[in-house]
C-alpha cells in the first residue's frame, strides 16, 4: 500500500472511531499538502477525494492571505467539505481571513495561540470581536 493509501486508511479509521462516539472530526488541511509553504498550497486531490466529506477542514496559514480568494477555500469547499479558518497571530491576516470566512460562508474562525500563548491574546481578542461584530472597526 502506498503512503497516501495508508494515510487515508488511518484518517478514515480515526473518523469512524470519532463517529461512533457522535463526535465530528476536524482536520488541519496542511495534513494533505504536498508543500510545506501554505501560502502556495499544493493540496493533494488524490487524498482529499477519498476522505469522508463530513470532516471539518481547518484551513490555516502563517501568512496574510490578502484580499483575494485564497485557493485552499474553493479546493476544499468544492470537494464538499465545510471549512473553518485559523489565522496566525497577525491582526491584518486575521482580519482578511475573517472577511473571507464571512463572504464564503465558512463555519467560522478557530483563532489559536499557536506556539506563542504569551503573545497571542491581542489577536485572539481581535478575532473574536471581529467575528461577532464584523462591521465594526477594531484597529487603533
Image (tube, rainbow, N blue to C red):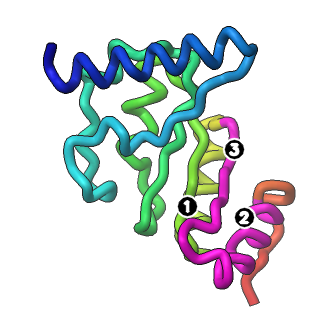
Considering only order in the chain, which callout, 3 or 1, is on the residue closer to the N terminus? 1
Q: Residue at x 56, y 11 (%)?
A: 16
Q: What is the x, y in percent for residue 77?
A: 48, 27
Q: Are marks 2 and 1 in contact (CB under 8 Å)?
A: yes
**Residue named by callout 1:** 87
Q: What is the x, y in percent for residue 69?
A: 43, 48
Considering only order in the chain, which callout, 1 or 2, is on the residue closer to the N terminus? 1
Q: Which residue is drawn at 58% across and 77% down?
A: 116
Q: Residues within 10 Å of mark 3 (few under 14, many from 20)?
A: some
Magenta highlight on residue 109: yes
For residue 108, the mark is: 3
**Residue named by callout 2:** 127
Q: In which quarter of the image is residue 25?
A: top right
User: Is 83 situated above or below 137?
Assistant: above
**Residue sitting nearer the eye, 10 or 65:** 10
Q: Is mark 1 on a helix, strand or loop?
A: loop
Q: Residue at x 58, y 17 (%)?
A: 54
User: Is 76 situated above or below 68?
Assistant: above
For residue 115, the mark is: none
Q: How far apart are marks 2 and 1 (CA)?
A: 9 Å
User: Which contiguous range is marked in magenta?
Assistant: 107-130
Q: How far apart are marks 1 and 3 (CA)?
A: 11 Å
User: Is 125 situated above or below 105?
Assistant: below
Q: Is mark 3 on a helix, strand or loop?
A: loop
Q: What is the x, y in percent for residue 52?
A: 48, 13
Q: Residues within 10 Å of mark 2 (few under 14, many from 20)?
A: many
Considering only order in the chain, which callout, 3 or 2, is on the residue closer to the N terminus? 3
The answer to whether residue 66 is visible is yes
Amino acid at each position: 500500500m502506498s503512503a497516501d493509501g495508508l494515510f487515508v486508511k488511518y484518517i478514515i479509521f480515526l473518523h469512524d472511531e470519532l463517529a461512533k462516539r457522535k463526535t465530528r472530526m476536524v482536520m488541519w488541511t496542511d495534513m494533505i499538502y504536498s508543500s510545506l509553504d501554505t501560502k502556495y498550497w499544493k493540496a493533494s486531490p488524490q487524498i482529499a477525494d477519498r476522505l469522508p466529506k463530513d470532516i471539518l477542514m481547518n484551513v490555516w496559514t502563517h501568512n496574510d492571505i490578502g484580499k483575494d480568494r485564497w485557493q485552499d477555500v474553493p479546493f476544499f469547499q468544492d470537494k464538499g467539505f465545510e471549512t473553518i479558518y485559523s489565522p496566525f497571530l497577525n491582526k491584518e491576516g486575521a482580519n482578511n481571513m475573517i472577511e473571507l470566512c464571512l463572504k464564503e460562508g465558512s463555519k467560522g474562525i478557530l483563532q489559536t495561540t499557536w506556539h506563542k500563548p504569551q503573545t497571542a491574546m491581542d489577536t485572539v481578542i481581535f478575532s473574536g470581536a471581529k467575528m461577532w461584530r464584523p462591521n465594526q472597526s477594531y484597529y487603533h
